[in-house]
Image (tube, rainbow, N blue to C red):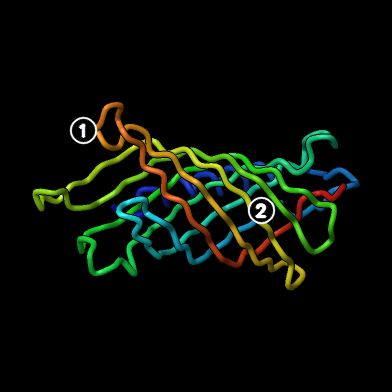
Amino acid sequence: MQLKPYLGLVLTVFLVFATDNARSQASPAASEAKLPLAIGLGVSGFDSDSNNDRLLGGTFWIDYSLNMLPHSLQGLGLEVYGRDLNYDRSQSEPSNLRQDVGGGGVFYSWHKYRNIRPYAKFEMGFGNMDYMNRTLRRVNQTRTVTSLGGGVEFRVMRSVWLRADYEYQNWPDFYKNTKPSGTLNPQGGTLGVMYHFGKPRLR
């Protein structure tokens, strides 16, 4: 499964946010007039939770900060993302081992420091895994995936930030032949760079 099916979702979200921003004739004095949107790209390394094998791949994300919220809720935002883990599998794993996830959710970032922003996130989406079972038959399974995570963003230039991210996923009822059905829990990290077209309103 490729990430192509999720590109339409990402573009739609981007256009909705851009259109909404264009309709605004004035911005609050305490916030920037620029679109509070960030686009990022990174390299991910995950424990696939399949015989403790790790996979590498790429991740992209789009963040939109909800600057129109009351002051007490500043820091909340929306994120859509896609990840394709398809590289660096060990020799003991099947050649088709692959995990893809795409979805979105909410994040909360703390803006108390000028160049450093810790954040937490909760996301839901769809995950797909290709592998080979004990009878050497190729298998493809798709699940609704939930994930918790967080990390730190560090500004290196005016609009360019680095991100170090950790994520823990839950794929329910993945192993149907166990009682109860077993879950798959991939987890890992992403290092990436992101560009902010604007910035969230600071406290």
Residue 106 as seen in the image, left or right of residue 131? right
The foreground one among 60 and 117 is 117
Mark 1: which amino acid? Answer: Asn
Q: Residue furthest bottom?
A: 157
Residue 123 percent coordinates (x, y): 53, 40
Relative image position of residue 167 (x, y in whole percent) = 53, 50
Q: Residue at x 9, y 49 (%)?
A: 135
Q: In this view, does 114 lie to the left or right of 98?
A: right
Mark closer to the chain start, 2 or 1 = 2
Between residues 152 and 194, which one lies in front from this camera angle?
Answer: 152
Identify the residue shown where x is 10% and y is 53%: 136
Tag 2's secondary structure?
A: strand
Residue 182, quarter of picture: top left
Count of residue discs: 2
Mark 1: few/some/many CA within 10 Å (<14, 14-19, 20+): few
| Label 2, residues with CA under 10 Å away: few <14, some 14-19, many ≥20 | many
Horizontal and vertical percent for residue 145?
Answer: 42, 39
Q: Which mark is residue 37?
A: 2
Q: Quadrant of residue 74?
A: top right
Q: Which of 17 and 54 is in front in this view?
A: 54
Q: Is residue 191 left or right of residue 71?
A: left
Q: Residue 159: x and y, percent?
A: 72, 67
Numbered disc 1: secondary structure? loop
Of residues 55 and 111, the one drawn nearer to the viewer in this rendering: 55
Query: Which label sits on residue 177?
Result: 1
Tell me which amino acid carries mark 2.
Leu
